[in-house]
Image: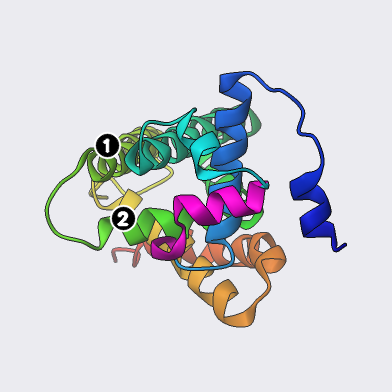
Amino acid sequence: MDARNANASAPRQRLSTDERQREIVATVLALARERGPEAITTQAIADRMGVTQGAIFRHFPDKAAIWLAVFAWVRESLDAVFAAAMDEGATPIAKIEAAFIAHVAFVAANPGVPRVMFHELQYPGDSPVRAEVRAMITGYRKRLAVLFTEAKAAGALPADLDVTLAPVLFIGAVQGLVIQSALAGDEAAMVKRARRLFPMLLHGYRGREKS
């Protein structure tokens, strides 16, 4: 008997609904690392967990509810990562750098996250899941804008820096690292690349010195 069949036939530990929901969310993100989000069916989730589809639907009413739980976990986790980064930086620029490195480290540890996020955003129209992703990104950009505003006030960044666009470059740089790492097949090197990239990103924010 192979390991997969052994796991499927072994008695499963009885978990609370919250614990089982977290397990389902973790399974979705693990699957997203291996395949396109459109291929993550409830049957695929059940197969990976070694349960029936019915067991999945005992904890979530439908697939949309699963995706909402996935993005709720991403939002909460990224919020926690951001908050921890703020404790590391002593200056506004140090906080921006800490947030950048922490964001990249989070993505490197959870490579399925950007795949499911940007997959959800590429389709037109609206849905509760898409609205959740947009709200999450909008909230994150606002928190970044506060950091850039503080850096401007401290004189560490130019007074004419557009703090509404600065987070776009920040997030775009993270996404660029995601794409490069996916092409190279080495997410583990993302943080090292992020540390090398940040000085260039900062140079872009500061712009050309006025004569």
Residue flagged by tag 1: what amino acid is it? Answer: Ala
Mark 1 falls on what kind of element?
Answer: helix
Q: Is residue 134 left or right of residue 207?
A: left
Q: Residue at x 38, y 32 (%)?
A: 150
Q: Which mark is residue 143?
A: none
Q: Residue at x 46, y 40 (%)?
A: 70
Which residue extends farthest left? 125
Percent position of residue 56, x then y: 51, 37
Q: Is residue 6 above or below residue 140?
A: below
Circle 1 residues within 10 Å: few <14, some 14–19, many ≥20: few
Q: Which mark is residue 120?
A: 2
Tell me if residue 189 can be seen: yes
Q: Which mark is residue 135?
A: 1
Tell me how far mark 2 sits from mark 1, CA to CA: 13 Å
Instruction: State the residue in front, 96 or 73.
Output: 73
Helix, strand or loop for the magenta stretch, by majority: helix
Instruction: State the residue in front, 10 or 90.
Output: 10
Where residue 118 sits, quadrant-wise, is bottom left
Q: Residue at x 44, y 65 (%)?
A: 39
Percent position of residue 59, x then y: 49, 28
Tell me if residue 170 can be seen: no
Q: Is residue 65 above or below residue 197?
A: above
**Stretch of the chain drawn in magenta:** 37-49
Q: Is residue 119 left or right of residue 109?
A: left
Residue flagged by tag 2: what amino acid is it? Answer: Glu
Q: Is residue 204 above or below residue 129?
A: below
